[in-house]
Image (spheres, rainbow, N blue to C red):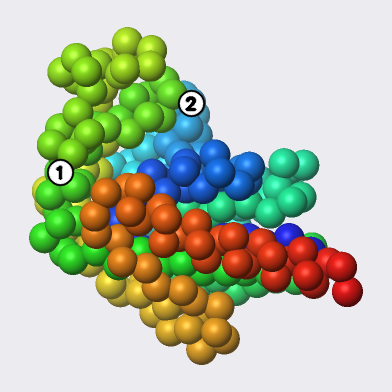
Amino acid sequence: MSNIYVLMGPQGAGKGTQSQLLADRFGLPIVATGDILREMSRKDTPFAHHVKEVLASGELVSDDILAKVIRDRLCLNDCVGGCILDGFPRTLPQALLLEKIAQEDGNRIVVIKIDVPRELLLRRLSGRRICKKCNSIYHVEFKPPKVDEVCDLDGEPLFTRPDDSIEVIQQRLQLYQEKTKPLLDYYGESNRLYRVDGTGTPENVFSRIAEIVAKETNTERGNAAQ
Ligand code: AMP
């Protein structure tokens, strides 16, 4: 039995940064559906063009497409010992599908919700910059690169995601309220939900999350030994 850690929280809560820190500390793979979809959207096919359009609009990609994306990814070998989910599930049908996949593999779902006030979310999102090549995340205010608009690791120019414009950010936060927030009740009712304070430095937030993951990893080992 392995643990599937679901990081939840609105866009800008720091799920991407925390996933990376968790992956480094606990040796778990990150499954970030947004990254997978962005990668898919770069091809020159009608399907890729469709995905690209939906991403740029800030809408959600359909549950059918996500079902295929997540099944194809979770069945890969690196997920056998568990994984970190960033950006999935986002709707109730997706949560139910994840439940089914976890049951089939005998895995547990542990949900960690990162709480951040709305004003801070907007500041974080509008200053975010990404390296297309290595997916490193920067911020003009909170984590600037050494050279303006250039990735420290590979010298590639940084870019602003099309869905990080103010209008699209508002739309994405609205969708989060409507579609994803109800999942917190769903997981809360079955006692699988932890809430952590997402303000402060990434390291502050990480120490809160790492404590939970360490505890849950021990439970996982205890269960396996029985
Ligand atoms: P993210 O990088 O997680 O903010 O995701 C970027 C975009 O990818 C979202 O605004 C959606 O258009 C799409 N996306 C990512 N994950 C999902 C999901 N689980 N369900 C539907 N759409 C998704």
Sort mark 2 into few (<14), some (14-19) or many (20+) by Cα contacts within 10 Å: few
Residue type marked 1: Ser
Q: Residue furthest right?
A: 226
Q: Which residue is mark 2?
A: 43
Quadrant where the N terminus sits is bottom right
Q: How many marks?
A: 2
User: What is the C-alpha distance between the residues marked 2 and 1?
Assistant: 27 Å
User: Residue 81: horizontal and vertical position, in percent?
Assistant: 74, 51
Q: Quadrant of residue 107?
A: bottom right
User: Is residue 57 depicted above or below 110 in this figure?
Assistant: above
Is residue 68 in sight in this rendering? Answer: no
Numbered mark located on residue 126 in the image: 1
User: Residue 160: horizontal and vertical position, in percent?
Assistant: 22, 32
Q: Residue at x 37, y 24 (%)?
A: 132
> What secondary structure is marked by label 1?
helix
Ligand 1 within 8 Å, label 2 CB: no
> What secondary structure is marked by label 2?
loop
Numbered mark located on residue 177 in the image: none
Sequence-first tag of 2 and 1: 2
- Horizontal placement of 8 versus 101: left or right? left
| Camera-nearest residue between 124 and 175 | 124
| Camera-nearest residue between 161 and 221 | 221
- Horizontal placement of 194 versus 95: left or right? left
